Image: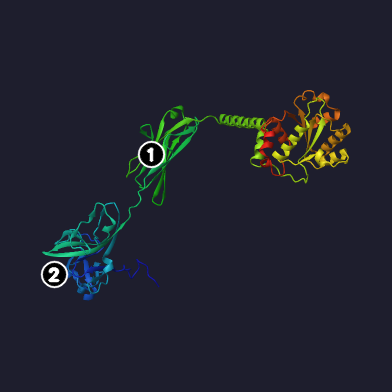
Amino acid sequence: MSVGCGLEPPCHPRPKNVCVRAGEMVALQCPRSIDSNTEVRLIWSRATDQDRVLTNMTADEQQQRSMSVHRGSLVILSASVEHEGKYSCTVGYGRNGSSEFVVTVNSAASRRCEDKQNYSQTCFTQQSCKLNCPDVNVPVVHSPNITSNGIQWYKVGESLQKDNYFPTVEKQNSGLYTCVRSYQYQGQKYNMTFTVILDVQPKKAEKTAAIISPRDDDVIHVELGSTVVIDCTAVTYSEFDDVSWLIGEFTVDQDSNLPVFFNSTRKIEGDEIQTTASLVFRKISEDDLSKNYTCKLAAVYQSSDFVTIHLRNAHPQYLLLCLCTVCIVAALTAAVIVYVRFKIDIVLFLRDTLGCHAKISDDKRYDAFVMGYKSHADSGLSAEDRRWLENVLEEKFGYRLCLVERDIQPGEALANAVLDCIEESRAVVLIPSSSDPGLGSGLLTAIHEALVERQTRLIFIESEMGEGSAAGSLAEALQLLSETGKCVTWRGRGATASSSFWKHLRFYLLPSQRPRKGRFLSQTSYNQGLI
């Protein structure tokens, strides 16, 4: 059954281990304080001397044993193996418990506790460094007949005395240093030696406290009459760094009863301290808009940092909404106008340069069926013009054409052959001809019905000179076809590839489903065709 402290028998603290070099001084201090005016005695004893009371030793006995006992202090002047053992100090003959010490003497032969007399200290390069001599088990100040003669420093392996202060410490200053505390007692000199292990590390990166928000000259838009809170956040590295607000040159108070005040909060993350000073406006007024507000970071180890902000009256939300709406409508209108105005150029650019067009899989053999019609204005294309136009469509732009003269077999019924070509083509191109191709009104009507039924594209080319009289001169069936399809005006062979005629014709035709062959045209053919 365990017994807790405060019950009988009393709990004794664990003995304190004390290590001392042979021939050196060590002081044992009883932790129990005693009023100098009290009659209660503090008794020192040693277990190895049959619990002999050391407090009762005479001055001669103390000198013989190389000891000095005075109330709560027992000093071993020159330690030897004979001084090893357990010591205790007791108040009032044990009625109030005792404190115990186990003394071990470290000799050159044994070295039993040498590591306990070594102390470590770390400094950083390019910074000042002061070595501290341990004050472990040293005599108390004003001990009777014991006076301090100071401290001497040596570096292990060197005989010259060293200074314990380095204005700028470097890596080569690392090593073992010995500090010797010297004391005088009754004309004799006694020493206490400690070893300090100096470890010089690379200089730590300097961290600078700074305001991270807001930025200098920031403009904060506020609404009159509203409550506004403006946060100033700074990252600092000292608990003594402070963040506050200024209005002009005057510091803002932290009294929350004022119309304008600030409060501060801190958040610690590792070695960083994030401080936020919140400037609070209970009700924004016109006068508030005319002032400058400065966030101030007062740092201990660097100059102060300042960030000034300005307040501006925010525009009503509906004005901003109206402005955005007008901008969007204007942008859409401009986009529509540009598209309508340059629609053909945009489509042809995407088709020719970027290859952006739909892939058609309708199994039709031809891109277009080219067929002539009789122009009654005597302004139709000559046979040479027609061959040139067909050649450019096939060789320059890569269209696969169905031509009456080439693809209809001799002796085949014209009406059936024409309808078959329409069936196998994605579009029909009607070209005005100065000669009569022999298309009757019945065939034209059948062509119209076939186009409507199959929803095939029709491009109706009319001559420039016959453009004005076309409506009155064409037969009724031809007139019906012209109204069904897209009309393009022929302006002669001098038209270039960028002319309105070619742009409109290619725009109305579906894109060719085979690679363009313009690169195979001879220079002579090109000069005779497009200039």
Q: Residue 349: x and y, percent?
A: 65, 37
**Position of the N terminus by quadrant:** bottom left
Q: Nearer the viewer, residue 339 or 282?
A: 339
Q: Is residue 247 toward the left or the right of residue 92 in the image?
A: right
Disc 2 residue type (three-letter): Gln
Q: Which mark is residue 380?
A: none
The residue wearing badge 2 is 63
Q: CA distance from mark 2 to mark 1?
A: 66 Å
User: Can residue 406 be seen?
Assistant: yes
Residue 223 in the image: state x and y as whole percent: 50, 31
Q: Which residue extends farthest left?
A: 187
Residue 419 image point, x, y percent: 85, 39
Instruction: Name the mark on residue 244.
Output: 1
Q: In this view of the protein, which residue sits in the foreground, 31 or 201?
A: 201
Q: What amino acid does circle 1 point to?
A: Ser
**Quick one: SS at disc 1?**
strand
Circle 2 or circle 1, nearest the eye: 1
Coordinates of residue 49 in the picture (x, y in percent): 21, 75
Residue at image coords 35%, 32%: 249
Quarter of the image for residue 371 reads top right
Could you tell whether 204 is left or right of 260 in the image? left
Residue 29: which quarter of the image?
bottom left
| Residue at the image point whose x is 76% and y is 35% from the top | 387
Residue 95 visible in the snapshot: no
Q: Nearer the viewer, residue 312 or 208?
A: 208
Disc 2 packing (10 Å; few <14; some 14–19; many ≥20): few
